[in-house]
Image (cartoon, helix red, strand yellow):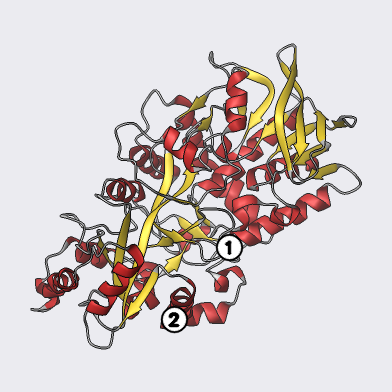
Amino acid sequence: MSQPLHSDVLVVGGGLAGIVTALECLQAGKLVTLVDRDSRERLGGLARWAFGGMALVGTPLQARMKIPDSPERALADWVRFGELGATDTLPLAWARYYVEHSRAEVYDWLCARGLKFLPAVNWVERGLHGEGNSLPRYHVLWGTSRLLALTMIAALERAGANGRLTLLSRTRITGLDHAAGAIVGAAGVNEETGQELRFAAPVAVLAMGGINGGHEEVRANWPAGTPLPASMLNGAHPYSDGKLHRLVQGLGGRIAAAGAMWNYAAGFPHPQPHFEGHGLSSIPCKSALWLDHRGRRIGPEPLVTGFDTHHLCQRVAGLERPWTWHLLNWRIAARELAISGAEHNQRIRDRQLLHFLRETMLGNHRLVRQLAQESPHFLVDDTLAGLAAKMNALAGGGHVKPEVLQATADAFDANFANGDKLHNDDQIRRIVHARQWGPDRLRTCKPAPLQMRGAGPFIAIQMQLVTRKSLGGLVTDMQSRVLGAQGQALPGLYSVGEAAGFGGGGACGKRSLEGTFLPGCILTARAAARHISSGR
């Protein structure tokens, strides 16, 4: 075994939370070792692939759009939607810190580093009955989260010049060393060469991501009393395996809310998967009809995206089969279809303003054609009968009867038989409401019959539940220190980002207002770095 690598701070995990922690510690004069399990070109973790949406409070963009937001209003939305109770002391404290400081510590901090946001603030997670975001807060990074990750990595490399940063990829931490009750270092292994490594540092910051990176962990932690689907796709990362969480638990740390998860109800297999079972999360079209495995519309309350993702997941998980269908036409897909992440949002990712504006105004036909060519789960046909045949060929079992699919479409289209003033359908009502907000109006079709002349061909997308984020994690205080069973800080041990449930072991509660994850990584990382750098 080689000699220990000495540093002031050991950061475990090269995602956004780990990078920000390392960067801030370097800028405070600390020597830092950062170890990451993935390859060097994938440094940045899921932030490198994410879309880059952020829930931010009291920003200039909100003011420009005359959105009267405030930390008090945002906190009330957060607590109500996440179902946080009075005993959730630390999650509540982190939620309050988030809404009070996301403007200065995230928005202003990123803008000072040259990053920009699209000028439109989006309105997501409104709640089934208005109990979610009472105002638009979802800010989208121009360049997506990929540019955020690359910007932070470049800053990290500059701050770590002259040997002040040791960066090791393909390295897994296998143990934490402690003496007299305090962290003194860690053991690790290079997963390519098998070389065993030792790290000597008085501070370790755990930024290894969530618990539920594999289906075994997801199933083990699935909330009791809620339906567990027979199969799911993975939108997290297999390296988020929970092993370091349990190692810390063995040292006296606590894991809270392991069953709290942020999953998505409408995913399909990645055409070029990065790992086994890799799923893409679609942003379901509001105007698509959400059908069960037999081609019947799910009801009596129809499923509509943009209001309560947690509710959608519960509804989908409780169905007879683990897949659903989205039934739409080309008109709807070109206007509304979107895939979460940087890969399928090239115009925003690559900052191609004119192309982005053209596709926003005229429809993203490019993405629709791409998915039709690349994904066997994206079916197109000129007739509903032909579409039913393709749905059965893909799923097997002959579940979708052509006459049932036709009846489903006819029943919806009957809403328009007597003009716009006489339709009576909850999905249409929600669409009309959403279109009152300008950015949603741009991206949501005016309600119309599915079989409207000239709107075809028809499209069916086979969807499954796709796992994403752990909302629970290691319990931490407001300095991101890991806490023990009696609420005491474990000396020298910190946790940030998803590993800490984005603060306190579960700041979001049961639901996120959406877009809270990237800012949660930044806020918890900066809190840890401040406390480490203060020397207290």
Decide which of 203, 437 is in the foreground and name it.
203
Above or below: residue 38 compared with residue 453: above
Q: Which mark, residue 187? A: none
Nearer-N-terminus badge (1/2): 1
**Measuring 61% from the left and 43% from the top, which residue is drawn there?**
239
Residue 466 pos. (x, y %): 43, 52
Tell me the quarter of the image containing the C terminus. Answer: top right
**C-alpha separation, residue under disc 1 versus residue under disc 2:** 21 Å
Amino acid beneath label 2: His
Amino acid beneath label 1: Thr
**Measuring 79% from the left and 39% from the top, which residue is drawn there?**
194
- 10 Å neighbourhood of mark 2: few (<14), some, or many (≥20)? some
* Element under disc 2: helix
Asked if residue 51 lies left or right of residue 283, the reply is right
Residue tagged by mark 1? 144
**Measuring 70% from the left and 13% from the top, which residue is drawn there?**
181
Dots 1, 2 in contact, CB < 8 A? no
Decide which of 248, 61 is in the foreground and name it.
248
Above or below: residue 475 compared with residue 277: above
* Element under disc 1: helix
Q: Quadrant of residue 475?
A: top right
Decide which of 10, 73 is in the foreground and name it.
10
- 10 Å neighbourhood of mark 1: few (<14), some, or many (≥20)? many
Residue 508 pos. (x, y %): 44, 39
Pair 1/2: label in front? 2
Residue tagged by mark 2? 365
Asked if residue 300 lies left or right of residue 179, the reply is left
Residue 438 pos. (x, y %): 37, 69
Q: Quadrant of residue 382?
A: bottom left
Tell me the quarter of the image containing the N terminus. Answer: top right
Extreme residue in the front direction: 397
